[in-house]
Amino acid sequence: MKLIQKTLVAAAVALSAPAFAGIAPTGTGNGELFLVLFNPTAEVSLTKDLGIGINDFRALDFNAAMAPAGSSKTWAIEAGNAEVAKFLAKAGASSDWRWYVQAGDSVGPQNVFGGRGLLTTLTDGVDAATIGTMKNNSFTANFGPINSFLSATNVNGDTEGDSHELHGYSFGDKTNGGYALTEGFAGINGGSFAPYTNDNAFGTSSAVYYVSRDVSSNLANAKYDQFDSQHGPSTFSVAAASGGDYVVSFTTAVPEPGTYALMLAGLAAVGLLARRRA
């Protein structure tokens, strides 16, 4: 199933935001997407509020059928920010960093796909079918660890406060209680409730999935849907940018070269037919 499509322009408008405060948890009915960048050896993490709710993001899927192939939305990670600087001072080499993007909505009917949902990246090499082995009771249990993590994150750094209109960063370690992989937090496997992991190496990309349930039975399997377009999977990525900064990107797939050739041939044929009719 292709996700609901709207234009890249509309998405960019919805995603624009000012400075920063608390990340909306799952119980708001439209929990905000957040990025976690971490070093598991140094046990430090940086959380960035991406400033858009899971349901809004799902509705604004950057689908190449509606936006140019290769279109992307980016979020800057500014090295000069105080919270980012704390992370960089303790995180070591970027070759040791890993990351994931996550969000949740725990409000709504349990027997309708999309009534409640999780958004997740997926570790490279993990079969997406693994997501579908998760039982509905485990799916529901994912929300608790997400909210536990956000409760800790939202009292640290410039995420502090109850406002969900401002979007920024929060540094976490064992000292301040905000380290993302602390036991009881969602971490990379939904607090052990997910049968898959969601983290990837810095500088790499990841497919993105929406997970939900469509029946009341807690013993039935959860259902999932990939963010994709007519040209292939859409992806999140985290990489270095200019000036010592970093960038988070969500990008639509680019057609294969052969697809472009077929498109051009088709356009040429249409043009020839039009000239013959003129």
Image (cartoon, rainbow, N blue to C red):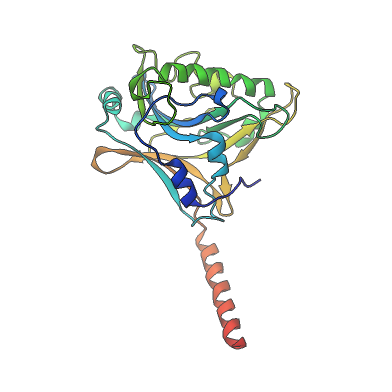
User: Can residue 183 be seen in this snapshot?
Assistant: yes
- State left or right for residue 35 relative to residue 217: left
90 shown above or below 120: above
Q: Residue at x 30, y 42 (%)?
A: 241
User: Can residue 204 be seen in this snapshot?
Assistant: no
Residue 243: x %, y % from top left: 23, 41
Q: How many marks?
A: 0
Residue 1: x %, y % from top left: 66, 45
In the image shown, does 42 or 89 lie closer to the viewer?
89
Q: Residue at x 43, y 34 (%)?
A: 50
- State left or right for residue 214 relative to residue 233: right
Q: Residue at x 62, y 32 (%)?
A: 211
Q: Residue at x 69, y 34 (%)?
A: 113
In the image shown, does 189 or 106 lie closer to the viewer?
106
Where residue 131 sits, quadrant-wise, is top right
Residue 250: x %, y % from top left: 46, 43
178 shown above or below 99: above
216 shown above or below 74: above
Check the image and name the residue furthest to the top.
Answer: 175
Where residue 263 sits, quadrant-wise, is bottom right
